Image (cartoon, rainbow, N blue to C red):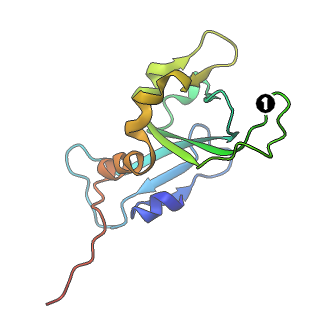
Amino acid sequence: MGYLMRRNILAYKAPPNNEGYDLICIHPDPRHVPSSGEIAQVRIQVKSRYATDCDRGFPLKDVSLSAFDFLTVVFMNIGKFGGKNDGSTGMREIEIYTLPNEFIREHHITTSSWQKVRLRKLEDEIQVFKGEAGFEQIARCLGVPKPIKKRVR
């Protein structure tokens, strides 16, 4: 939420037990009327993984696919926990990817009872959705301009 609000996108936590999305985002101007190609609200599902050595995948049921516009996955990278690791080593920078619904649908795996999205082999492909570039997609959908300071002369 903080990263979205930093980009001047109003972000609110969805009501508890709301299926399919965790955040609702809207334009900061209450009088804004969406133009062609814009939408009034964006629904975001959030997934997170704390282990640096996670498999870069996350569970996602196919019934959720129609409930969100974007899925933000946060790799917190707090340490390595696999094998004999106890989490005390392997800390790295946090990674945030904001993936469009179409991308998630394309990479959604339904072949097992644990329906998943796996990103391990997609590292190059997901770089365009990393960090600020990912949040910028949401800003474009809502028509939120970059905040700039107007100088008075």
Q: Which residue is mark 1?
A: 82
Give the residue drawn at x 47%, y 45%. 43
Q: Is residue 107 above or below residue 74?
A: above
Q: Position of residue 85 (x, y in %)?
A: 82, 35
Q: Position of residue 34 (x, y in %)?
A: 26, 53
Q: Position of residue 18 (x, y in %)?
A: 62, 44
* Viewer-closest of 130 and 142: 130
For numbered disc 1, what is the local secondary structure?
loop
Give the residue drawn at x 53%, y 58%. 1
User: Which residue is situated farthest in the bottom direction here?
Assistant: 153
Q: Is residue 93 above or below residue 9?
A: above
Give the residue drawn at x 61%, y 9%. 111
Q: Quadrant of residue 81?
A: top right
Say few, some or many: other residues with alpha carbon within 10 Å of mark 1 (under 14 / 14 to 19 / 20 or more): few
* Viewer-closest of 99 and 123: 123
Q: Residue 100, can we see it? A: no
Q: Residue 54, can we see it? A: yes
Q: Position of residue 137 (x, y in %)?
A: 35, 45
Q: Quadrant of residue 100?
A: top left
| 66 horizontally vs 8: left or right | right
Q: Is residue 112 above or below residue 42?
A: above
* Viewer-closest of 103 and 38: 103
> Of the residues shown, which amino acid type is indicated by label 1?
Gly
User: Which residue is situated farthest in the front direction here?
Assistant: 89
**Quadrant the C terminus occupies:** bottom left
| 39 horizontally vs 95: left or right | left
Give the residue drawn at x 49%, y 41%. 97
